[in-house]
Amino acid sequence: MPLRKSLELLDEKALAPYKVASKTEISNQEVIESLGTQDYIQWLLEDTEAAVDSTVRQCLLFITYYDLPDRVPHVPEECHTGVGHQRLASDSVTFEINKDGIVEKIPATYLVFASTSSSYWGMDTKFPILYLFNVNESYANNRESARFALNKNIFSKHSYFSKVEWKFFNIRFGKPVYPTKEEAITASKKLLSIILPILEKEHWPAG
């Protein structure tokens, strides 16, 4: 199923208090082919309500959509280890998101990576990444559960999946700083309570 509305047309004003600081397009065709879709956005958001020096002031939001779900590619566990990062932690988390007075439990995955290069200095280079899938109007927190959800829909005429991935950070004295798990989880709940309803109502297919 195609998107109801392109991700690129996401209403920036509806993201408040988040402000879109920049938008990045992938120019490398090999990366696009590896990604498996042309339907994506990679936006840098700024939370105008967060303190200027807050570790969750900035958020890199990466959303991809697949209308031919014959596979589930590009999970952070593989992408980041493939470019020289070591995965230090992986945990399942659940967010309780209020949607028009109804609280829905949304599963996601919380990851922590660190650089494995010679410039790795330890604690200050660790960074968290979170992600989730929406598969045929339901949520999944990893590739295996997303594939399971797709397989359940094997006899349907229509199917799709979308991945929402995000990372919080800030820049201090020219260097990136990252939030603790508690800070990232709290900020994630705020972000998802805004972005998911928009995606569900305006972009992802319904029915």
Image (cartoon, helix red, strand yellow):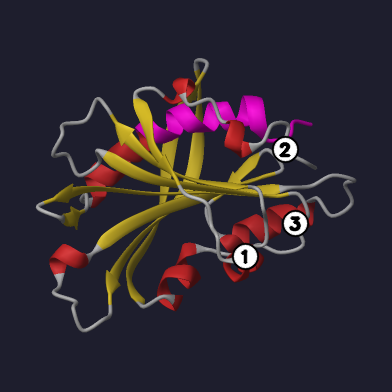
Magenta: predominant secondary structure element?
helix
Q: Quadrant of the C terminus?
A: top right
Image spot of residue 79 (x, y percent): 48, 69
Residue linked to disc 1: 73
Mark-to-mark CA distance, 1 and 2: 19 Å
Mark-to-mark CA distance, 1 and 3: 10 Å
Q: Secondary structure at mark 1?
A: loop
Image spot of residue 96 (x, y percent): 43, 33
Which residues lie in the magenta part?
Answer: 190-207
Quick check: 111 left or right of 72? left
103 and 13: which is toward the camera: 13
Q: Residue at x 53, y 32 (%)?
A: 196
Quick check: 38 left or right of 174? right
Q: Residue at x 80, y 50 (%)?
A: 153
Image spot of residue 39 (x, y percent): 65, 48
Q: Earlier in the sequence, mark 2 or mark 3?
A: 2
What amino acid type is highlighted by mark number 1? Pro
For label 3, the crowd category at 10 Å Cα-Cα, with few meaning under 14, some 14 to 19 and many 20 or more, is: some
Quick check: 159 left or right of 16? right
Q: Residue at x 64, y 56 (%)?
A: 146
Q: Earlier in the sequence, mark 1 or mark 2?
A: 2
Residue linked to disc 2: 3
Residue linked to disc 3: 69
Mark in the foreground, 1 or 2: 2
Magenta stretch: includes residue 111: no
Q: Secondary structure at mark 2?
A: loop
